[in-house]
Amino acid sequence: MRLSEISAIISDNIDGIYKPFREPRTITISGAQYSRVSHLNNFKSSIDKLESLNLFNYLTDEIKKSLIYNVGSDTIDLAQTEYNKLERFAKELGFLASSMVTSINLVFSEVPEDEVSVKLPKFQTFNEFFHILKTLQKAFEQAVYNSTIDGTVTIGGFEPGSRWINFRVGSQAAVTLIGSLVWAGISISNQINTNAHQEEDLKTKGLKNEYLSAVMEANIKQIDLLIQSEAELIYKERFSDSVDNGISKIDQEQVEKLKLSIKSFNEIISMGGEVHPALSASDSIKMAFPEKSPINLIESRTKQLGKNAGTNNDQ
Protein backbone atom coordinates (compact mmCIF):
# COMPACT_ATOMS: atom_id res chain seq x y z
CA MET A 1 0.00 0.00 0.00
CA ARG A 2 1.25 3.51 -0.83
CA LEU A 3 2.39 5.74 2.03
CA SER A 4 0.03 8.43 0.76
CA GLU A 5 -2.84 5.92 0.89
CA ILE A 6 -1.90 4.94 4.46
CA SER A 7 -1.91 8.63 5.39
CA ALA A 8 -5.37 9.11 3.83
CA ILE A 9 -6.87 6.09 5.66
CA ILE A 10 -5.49 7.24 9.01
CA SER A 11 -6.63 10.84 8.48
CA ASP A 12 -10.16 9.67 7.62
CA ASN A 13 -10.42 7.64 10.84
CA ILE A 14 -8.54 9.58 13.52
CA ASP A 15 -11.65 11.46 14.65
CA GLY A 16 -13.52 8.18 15.06
CA ILE A 17 -10.80 6.95 17.45
CA TYR A 18 -10.95 9.99 19.75
CA LYS A 19 -14.68 10.78 19.60
CA PRO A 20 -15.97 8.35 22.32
CA PHE A 21 -13.53 9.80 24.87
CA ARG A 22 -14.16 13.52 24.36
CA GLU A 23 -17.27 13.81 26.55
CA PRO A 24 -17.72 10.67 28.64
CA ARG A 25 -20.65 10.86 31.03
CA THR A 26 -20.00 9.63 34.57
CA ILE A 27 -22.93 7.80 36.18
CA THR A 28 -23.42 5.85 39.39
CA ILE A 29 -24.86 2.33 39.37
CA SER A 30 -25.35 0.52 42.70
CA GLY A 31 -22.87 2.87 44.35
CA ALA A 32 -20.16 2.26 41.73
CA GLN A 33 -18.94 4.76 39.15
CA TYR A 34 -19.34 4.00 35.46
CA SER A 35 -18.51 5.93 32.30
CA ARG A 36 -21.15 6.05 29.58
CA VAL A 37 -19.37 5.81 26.22
CA SER A 38 -21.08 6.65 22.91
CA HIS A 39 -20.22 6.62 19.18
CA LEU A 40 -19.08 3.00 19.44
CA ASN A 41 -20.08 1.96 15.92
CA ASN A 42 -17.98 4.71 14.39
CA PHE A 43 -15.14 3.83 16.78
CA LYS A 44 -15.21 0.14 15.83
CA SER A 45 -15.27 0.99 12.13
CA SER A 46 -12.21 3.23 12.56
CA ILE A 47 -10.41 0.50 14.49
CA ASP A 48 -11.09 -1.97 11.66
CA LYS A 49 -9.69 0.47 9.09
CA LEU A 50 -6.49 1.03 11.10
CA GLU A 51 -6.18 -2.69 11.80
CA SER A 52 -6.22 -3.35 8.03
CA LEU A 53 -2.93 -1.42 7.75
CA ASN A 54 -1.13 -4.01 9.91
CA LEU A 55 0.84 -1.23 11.58
CA PHE A 56 -0.74 -1.03 15.03
CA ASN A 57 -1.67 -4.66 15.67
CA TYR A 58 -0.67 -4.73 19.35
CA LEU A 59 -2.99 -1.82 20.16
CA THR A 60 -5.91 -2.87 17.95
CA ASP A 61 -5.73 -6.40 19.40
CA GLU A 62 -5.89 -5.03 22.95
CA ILE A 63 -8.78 -2.70 22.07
CA LYS A 64 -10.73 -5.59 20.55
CA LYS A 65 -10.59 -7.42 23.92
CA SER A 66 -12.77 -4.67 25.40
CA LEU A 67 -16.33 -5.29 26.53
CA ILE A 68 -17.58 -2.88 23.86
CA TYR A 69 -17.14 -5.71 21.35
CA ASN A 70 -19.68 -7.81 23.28
CA VAL A 71 -22.52 -5.42 22.41
CA GLY A 72 -24.01 -4.18 19.18
CA SER A 73 -25.38 -0.91 20.50
CA ASP A 74 -23.77 2.48 19.95
CA THR A 75 -23.55 3.23 23.69
CA ILE A 76 -22.30 1.25 26.71
CA ASP A 77 -21.72 1.85 30.42
CA LEU A 78 -18.21 0.76 31.42
CA ALA A 79 -16.79 0.28 34.89
CA GLN A 80 -14.12 2.90 35.55
CA THR A 81 -11.16 0.49 35.35
CA GLU A 82 -12.42 -0.93 32.03
CA TYR A 83 -13.02 2.57 30.67
CA ASN A 84 -9.57 3.77 31.72
CA LYS A 85 -7.87 0.82 30.00
CA LEU A 86 -9.83 1.30 26.77
CA GLU A 87 -9.17 5.05 26.77
CA ARG A 88 -5.43 4.52 27.32
CA PHE A 89 -5.09 2.09 24.39
CA ALA A 90 -7.28 4.23 22.11
CA LYS A 91 -5.40 7.46 22.81
CA GLU A 92 -2.04 5.72 22.37
CA LEU A 93 -3.27 4.40 19.02
CA GLY A 94 -4.49 7.86 18.04
CA PHE A 95 -1.18 9.45 19.00
CA LEU A 96 0.93 6.93 17.06
CA ALA A 97 -1.33 7.08 14.01
CA SER A 98 -1.34 10.90 14.00
CA SER A 99 2.45 10.95 14.33
CA MET A 100 2.74 8.66 11.33
CA VAL A 101 0.54 10.99 9.23
CA THR A 102 2.73 13.95 10.24
CA SER A 103 5.86 12.05 9.19
CA ILE A 104 4.39 10.96 5.86
CA ASN A 105 3.17 14.48 5.09
CA LEU A 106 6.68 15.81 5.67
CA VAL A 107 7.88 13.52 2.89
CA PHE A 108 5.05 14.17 0.43
CA SER A 109 3.88 17.55 -0.72
CA GLU A 110 0.20 18.04 -1.59
CA VAL A 111 -0.69 15.97 -4.66
CA PRO A 112 -2.02 18.04 -7.60
CA GLU A 113 -5.40 17.03 -9.02
CA ASP A 114 -4.03 16.38 -12.51
CA GLU A 115 -1.82 13.57 -11.19
CA VAL A 116 -2.38 9.88 -11.96
CA SER A 117 -0.73 7.19 -9.84
CA VAL A 118 0.55 4.03 -11.51
CA LYS A 119 1.76 0.92 -9.72
CA LEU A 120 4.32 -0.58 -12.07
CA PRO A 121 4.11 -4.32 -12.78
CA LYS A 122 6.91 -6.40 -11.29
CA PHE A 123 10.10 -6.45 -13.34
CA GLN A 124 13.54 -8.01 -12.98
CA THR A 125 15.56 -6.74 -15.94
CA PHE A 126 16.23 -3.37 -17.55
CA ASN A 127 14.53 -4.60 -20.72
CA GLU A 128 11.34 -5.40 -18.79
CA PHE A 129 11.49 -2.03 -17.01
CA PHE A 130 12.00 -0.07 -20.24
CA HIS A 131 9.19 -2.03 -21.95
CA ILE A 132 6.80 -1.07 -19.12
CA LEU A 133 7.77 2.60 -19.36
CA LYS A 134 7.44 2.57 -23.16
CA THR A 135 3.97 1.00 -22.89
CA LEU A 136 2.91 3.64 -20.37
CA GLN A 137 4.26 6.37 -22.62
CA LYS A 138 2.04 5.13 -25.46
CA ALA A 139 -0.94 4.75 -23.14
CA PHE A 140 -0.74 8.35 -21.91
CA GLU A 141 0.60 10.30 -24.88
CA GLN A 142 -1.65 8.78 -27.56
CA ALA A 143 -4.66 9.92 -25.52
CA VAL A 144 -3.85 13.37 -24.17
CA TYR A 145 -1.64 14.93 -26.87
CA ASN A 146 -4.34 16.63 -28.95
CA SER A 147 -6.00 20.03 -29.23
CA THR A 148 -9.24 18.94 -27.51
CA ILE A 149 -7.75 17.51 -24.32
CA ASP A 150 -4.63 19.71 -24.50
CA GLY A 151 -2.81 17.50 -22.03
CA THR A 152 0.83 17.02 -21.12
CA VAL A 153 2.70 14.05 -19.65
CA THR A 154 5.41 14.63 -17.05
CA ILE A 155 6.69 12.47 -14.22
CA GLY A 156 5.58 13.80 -10.84
CA GLY A 157 7.85 11.47 -8.87
CA PHE A 158 8.20 8.02 -7.31
CA GLU A 159 6.88 7.00 -3.91
CA PRO A 160 9.85 5.86 -1.79
CA GLY A 161 10.20 2.12 -1.24
CA SER A 162 7.50 1.20 -3.76
CA ARG A 163 6.80 0.63 -7.45
CA TRP A 164 4.37 3.58 -7.55
CA ILE A 165 5.12 6.37 -10.01
CA ASN A 166 3.06 9.54 -10.41
CA PHE A 167 2.35 11.16 -13.78
CA ARG A 168 1.00 14.69 -14.27
CA VAL A 169 -1.23 14.99 -17.32
CA GLY A 170 -1.94 18.72 -17.35
CA SER A 171 -5.69 19.05 -16.83
CA GLN A 172 -8.85 17.57 -15.32
CA ALA A 173 -10.03 16.66 -18.83
CA ALA A 174 -6.86 14.60 -19.33
CA VAL A 175 -7.27 12.81 -15.98
CA THR A 176 -10.90 11.86 -16.64
CA LEU A 177 -9.95 10.65 -20.12
CA ILE A 178 -7.24 8.43 -18.60
CA GLY A 179 -9.84 7.08 -16.16
CA SER A 180 -12.11 6.04 -19.04
CA LEU A 181 -9.22 4.39 -20.88
CA VAL A 182 -8.12 2.49 -17.77
CA TRP A 183 -11.70 1.29 -17.26
CA ALA A 184 -11.76 0.06 -20.85
CA GLY A 185 -8.36 -1.59 -20.45
CA ILE A 186 -9.52 -3.52 -17.38
CA SER A 187 -12.74 -4.67 -19.10
CA ILE A 188 -10.72 -5.88 -22.11
CA SER A 189 -8.38 -7.78 -19.79
CA ASN A 190 -11.36 -9.42 -18.07
CA GLN A 191 -12.90 -10.46 -21.41
CA ILE A 192 -9.58 -11.92 -22.61
CA ASN A 193 -9.33 -13.96 -19.39
CA THR A 194 -12.93 -15.16 -19.79
CA ASN A 195 -12.22 -16.23 -23.37
CA ALA A 196 -9.04 -18.03 -22.30
CA HIS A 197 -10.94 -20.01 -19.67
CA GLN A 198 -13.59 -20.90 -22.24
CA GLU A 199 -10.98 -22.12 -24.72
CA GLU A 200 -9.19 -24.15 -22.05
CA ASP A 201 -12.50 -25.72 -21.01
CA LEU A 202 -13.27 -26.68 -24.62
CA LYS A 203 -9.80 -28.21 -24.96
CA THR A 204 -10.29 -30.42 -21.91
CA LYS A 205 -13.65 -31.53 -23.29
CA GLY A 206 -11.92 -32.74 -26.47
CA LEU A 207 -13.36 -30.29 -28.97
CA LYS A 208 -11.91 -30.93 -32.42
CA ASN A 209 -9.09 -28.63 -33.45
CA GLU A 210 -10.96 -27.08 -36.38
CA TYR A 211 -13.88 -26.12 -34.13
CA LEU A 212 -11.55 -24.87 -31.40
CA SER A 213 -9.72 -22.72 -33.95
CA ALA A 214 -13.05 -21.25 -35.04
CA VAL A 215 -13.89 -20.38 -31.42
CA MET A 216 -10.47 -18.77 -30.90
CA GLU A 217 -10.82 -16.73 -34.08
CA ALA A 218 -14.29 -15.60 -33.02
CA ASN A 219 -12.91 -14.56 -29.61
CA ILE A 220 -10.17 -12.48 -31.25
CA LYS A 221 -12.79 -10.69 -33.37
CA GLN A 222 -14.92 -10.16 -30.26
CA ILE A 223 -12.00 -8.45 -28.49
CA ASP A 224 -11.31 -6.26 -31.51
CA LEU A 225 -14.97 -5.20 -31.62
CA LEU A 226 -15.00 -4.50 -27.89
CA ILE A 227 -11.89 -2.31 -28.15
CA GLN A 228 -13.47 -0.47 -31.09
CA SER A 229 -16.75 0.12 -29.25
CA GLU A 230 -14.98 1.27 -26.08
CA ALA A 231 -12.81 3.70 -28.07
CA GLU A 232 -15.82 5.09 -29.93
CA LEU A 233 -17.76 5.54 -26.67
CA ILE A 234 -14.84 7.41 -25.09
CA TYR A 235 -14.47 9.54 -28.22
CA LYS A 236 -18.16 10.52 -28.10
CA GLU A 237 -17.89 11.42 -24.41
CA ARG A 238 -14.60 13.31 -24.47
CA PHE A 239 -14.15 14.71 -27.99
CA SER A 240 -16.07 16.86 -30.47
CA ASP A 241 -16.64 15.69 -34.03
CA SER A 242 -14.91 17.66 -36.77
CA VAL A 243 -17.14 19.46 -39.29
CA ASP A 244 -16.57 19.17 -43.07
CA ASN A 245 -18.93 21.17 -45.32
CA GLY A 246 -21.45 21.30 -42.54
CA ILE A 247 -21.30 17.53 -41.94
CA SER A 248 -20.17 16.23 -38.55
CA LYS A 249 -17.41 13.61 -38.82
CA ILE A 250 -15.70 11.35 -36.32
CA ASP A 251 -11.93 11.78 -36.25
CA GLN A 252 -10.97 8.18 -37.02
CA GLU A 253 -7.30 8.92 -36.42
CA GLN A 254 -8.09 9.95 -32.85
CA VAL A 255 -10.24 6.83 -32.36
CA GLU A 256 -7.25 4.71 -33.46
CA LYS A 257 -5.07 6.51 -30.93
CA LEU A 258 -7.63 5.78 -28.19
CA LYS A 259 -7.61 2.12 -29.22
CA LEU A 260 -3.82 2.04 -28.85
CA SER A 261 -4.10 3.61 -25.40
CA ILE A 262 -6.71 1.03 -24.35
CA LYS A 263 -4.48 -1.80 -25.55
CA SER A 264 -1.49 -0.32 -23.74
CA PHE A 265 -3.35 0.07 -20.44
CA ASN A 266 -4.70 -3.46 -20.89
CA GLU A 267 -1.11 -4.71 -21.21
CA ILE A 268 -0.01 -2.89 -18.04
CA ILE A 269 -3.01 -4.21 -16.09
CA SER A 270 -2.55 -7.76 -17.41
CA MET A 271 1.03 -7.67 -16.11
CA GLY A 272 -0.20 -6.74 -12.62
CA GLY A 273 -0.03 -2.95 -12.78
CA GLU A 274 -2.59 -0.53 -11.37
CA VAL A 275 -3.70 2.98 -12.35
CA HIS A 276 -5.58 5.28 -9.96
CA PRO A 277 -6.39 8.98 -9.58
CA ALA A 278 -4.73 11.04 -6.87
CA LEU A 279 -6.16 10.29 -3.43
CA SER A 280 -7.11 13.96 -3.10
CA ALA A 281 -8.87 14.05 -6.49
CA SER A 282 -12.42 15.41 -6.72
CA ASP A 283 -15.39 13.04 -6.87
CA SER A 284 -15.96 13.84 -10.55
CA ILE A 285 -12.44 12.59 -11.36
CA LYS A 286 -12.70 9.50 -9.14
CA MET A 287 -15.99 8.54 -10.82
CA ALA A 288 -14.20 8.40 -14.20
CA PHE A 289 -12.04 5.55 -12.87
CA PRO A 290 -13.37 2.10 -12.02
CA GLU A 291 -14.00 1.44 -8.33
CA LYS A 292 -11.35 -0.43 -6.35
CA SER A 293 -13.40 -3.60 -6.42
CA PRO A 294 -12.00 -7.02 -7.38
CA ILE A 295 -10.67 -6.40 -10.88
CA ASN A 296 -12.52 -9.36 -12.40
CA LEU A 297 -15.87 -7.77 -11.43
CA ILE A 298 -15.26 -4.56 -13.40
CA GLU A 299 -17.51 -4.60 -16.45
CA SER A 300 -17.20 -2.89 -19.82
CA ARG A 301 -18.97 0.46 -19.86
CA THR A 302 -20.46 -0.29 -23.30
CA LYS A 303 -22.03 -3.43 -21.84
CA GLN A 304 -23.32 -1.44 -18.86
CA LEU A 305 -24.92 1.10 -21.19
CA GLY A 306 -26.47 -1.73 -23.17
CA LYS A 307 -27.99 -3.23 -20.04
CA ASN A 308 -29.32 0.14 -18.93
CA ALA A 309 -30.85 0.72 -22.36
CA GLY A 310 -32.49 -2.70 -22.21
CA THR A 311 -33.91 -1.98 -18.75
CA ASN A 312 -35.32 1.36 -19.91
CA ASN A 313 -36.93 -0.32 -22.92
CA ASP A 314 -38.53 -2.95 -20.68
CA GLN A 315 -40.09 -0.17 -18.65
Image: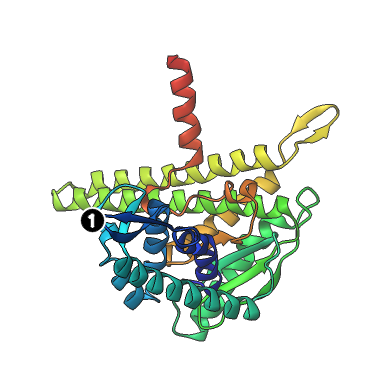
Which residue sits furthest front?
Answer: 31
User: Horizontally, is 162 left or right of 67 in the view?
Assistant: right
Q: Quadrant of residue 219?
A: top left
Neighbours of disc 1 within 10 Å: few (<14), some (14-19), many (20+): few
Q: Is residue 124 left or right of residue 110?
A: left
Q: Quadrant of residue 280?
A: bottom right
The residue where tag 1 is placed is: 70
In this rendering, is residue 138 above or below 249?
Answer: below
Q: How is the image coloured?
A: rainbow
Where is residue 82? Give x, y as percent.
30, 67
| Residue at the (63%, 67%) spot, across then down | 137
User: 306 left or right of 40?
Assistant: right
The residue sitting at the right extreme is 245
Nearer-the-camera pick, 264 or 155: 155
Q: Position of residue 66 (x, y in %)?
A: 28, 65
Residue farthest toward the bottom in the current orientation of the protein? 125
**Quarter assignment of residue 61:** bottom left
- Residue at the image point whose x is 39% and y is 63% from the top: 47
Q: Name the residue at the top extreme.
A: 315
Helix, strand or loop for disc 1: helix
Residue 53 appears in the rendering:
no
Q: Position of residue 58 (x, y in %)?
A: 32, 78
Q: Residue at x 54, y 70 (%)?
A: 7
> How many marks on residues?
1
Relative image position of residue 289 (x, y in whole percent): 55, 51
